[in-house]
Amino acid sequence: MRISELSSRSGVPVATIKFYLREHVLHDGVRTAATQAQYDETHLARLSLIRALVGVGGLSIARVHQILHTIEHPPESMHELLGLATAPGAAAAHDADDDHDRVHALMREWGWRVSEKDCSTHASLARALQALDDAEFVLPDGALRMYQQHMEQIATAELATVPTGSPEATVRFVVLGTVLPESLLLVLRRMAQQEASARRFDGG
């Protein structure tokens, strides 16, 4: 198909397709003339993935590059593949005040493995905990442990359904399954709070 048909079938404007081609997140078509090329179903599939990552997922083109590289050059370890698929786009800057020791102690208390490779997420948790401290907001007893247990249950259920047939299928599922449900989880939490509030304070 020509680029106009690719645009029509994918719903992606021609100018955007050309941008993706220039940025090498979309592979070249087969040249039929100096200014023309033919595209196929693989281009449609790749555009679908890019749209999900950039659009709903809100990822940068640089992050999309990283994900596509992971798909094309997957590590041997499935655990490492999943780690690369869900890693931040760039290593988070670690402030001197990031209390990794506090986070690592919590992880060991929860029975979670501590790996220095994951310290960008450790830094994020350290800052989240520090923000609570700075606001002088004390979580109710057992709240952090409850959050951790529920998140572990969710993660276990999600990873149980990860396809392993191909790196592309795995990465697509994990990245979209990580990015897209996050807003869903937040909305469900707020809706649950509304329901719990009505039950407690609204008298039915």
Image (spheres, helix red, strand yellow):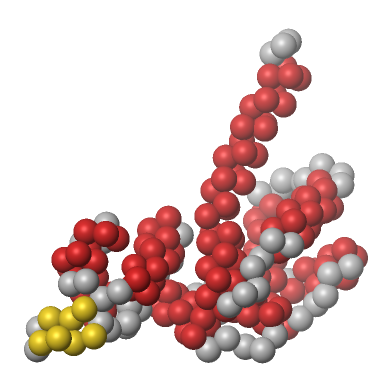
- The location of residue 74, given as percent across then percent down, is 57, 86
Q: In the rendered view, would you say 196 is above or below 188?
A: above
In the rendered view, does 133 fall on the left or right side of 66? right
- The location of residue 92, given as percent across then percent down, is 56, 75
Residue at image location 57% in from the left, 78% down from the top = 167
Residue at image location 27% in from the left, 59% down from the top = 9
Residue at image location 72% in from the left, 11% down from the top = 204
Residue 84 seen in this snapshot:
yes
Q: Quadrant of residue 27?
A: bottom left
In the rendered view, does 136 fall on the left or right side of 186? right
Can you say which quadrant of the picture contains the N terminus?
A: bottom left
Residue at image location 87% in from the left, 44% down from the top = 141
How many numbered dots are placed on residues in this image? Answer: 0
- The location of residue 61, given as percent across then percent down, is 37, 73
Identity of the residue furthest to the top in this view? 203
Residue 97 seen in this snapshot:
no
Identity of the residue furthest to the left in this view? 34
Q: In the rendered view, would you say 113 is above or below 149?
A: below
Q: Quadrant of residue 23?
A: bottom left
In the rendered view, does 21 fall on the left or right side of 34? right
In the rendered view, does 73 fall on the left or right side of 151? left
In the image, 146 versus 174, the foreground residue is 174
Q: Quadrant of residue 47?
A: bottom left
- The location of residue 203, given as percent across then percent down, is 73, 10
